[in-house]
Image (tube, rainbow, N blue to C red):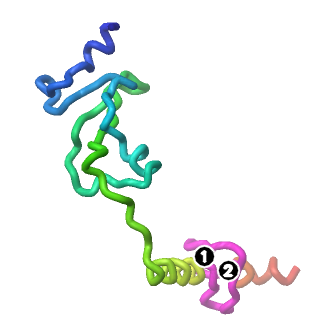
């Protein structure tokens, strides 16, 4: 075991406060948020169970681990939520001046479509 790995080996949490492992050294049963999401799970309000530390660019990096057995299934959006999202995205593409639905999102800096914001260029 290298010195760098040994510096991050604290499976009982005596040094860092929570169980700490080196890069790719966590035992089975722990997963990061991204790994949980890939498995269709979410942490579900559980506290951080462990961490992985490694030497990265700019210093020591950390990834927090959650227990897989306490993870809950990922929630799915209801039909009403999906309908509301669709309506909000449509509103972002609708020009308030000419009421045309654009193929792009209206720039917030302009507040209207480019044809209404720059009428001289649209006529040319």
- Mark seen at residue 63: none
Magenta span main SS: loop
Q: Which element type, helix, strand or loop, lies under badge 1?
A: loop
Question: What residue is rendered at 35% in x and 40% in y?
Answer: 31
Question: What residue is rendered at 37% in x and 47% in y?
Answer: 33
Left or right of 96? Residue 76 is left
Q: Quadrant of the C terminus?
A: bottom right
Q: Could you say which quadrant of the image residue 41 lies in? A: bottom left
Left or right of 99? Residue 3 is left
Crowding at mark 2 (Cα within 10 Å: few <14, some 14-19, many 20+):
many
Residue matched to label 1:
110
Say which of 63 and 71 sits in front. 71
Marks 2, 1: nearer the viewer:
2
Q: Position of residue 45 (x, y in %)?
A: 23, 56
Q: Which element type, helix, strand or loop, lies under badge 2?
A: loop
Left or right of 86? Residue 100 is right
Residue matched to label 2:
113
Question: What residue is rendered at 20% in x and 48% in y?
Answer: 47
């Amino acid at each position: 075991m290298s010195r760098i790995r040994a510096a991050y080996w604290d499976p009982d949490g005596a040094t860092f406060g929570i169980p700490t492992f080196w890069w790719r050294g966590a035992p089975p049963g722990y997963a990061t948020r991204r790994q949980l999401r890939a498995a269709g799970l979410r942490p579900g309000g559980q506290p951080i169970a462990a961490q992985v530390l490694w030497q990265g660019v700019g210093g020591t990096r950390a990834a927090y681990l959650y227990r897989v057995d306490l993870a809950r299934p990922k929630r799915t959006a209801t039909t009403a939520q999906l309908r509301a999202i669709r309506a909000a995205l449509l509103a972002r593409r609708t020009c308030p001046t000419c009421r045309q639905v654009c193929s792009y999102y209206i720039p917030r800096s302009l507040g209207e479509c480019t044809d209404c914001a720059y009428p001289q260029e649209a006529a040319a």
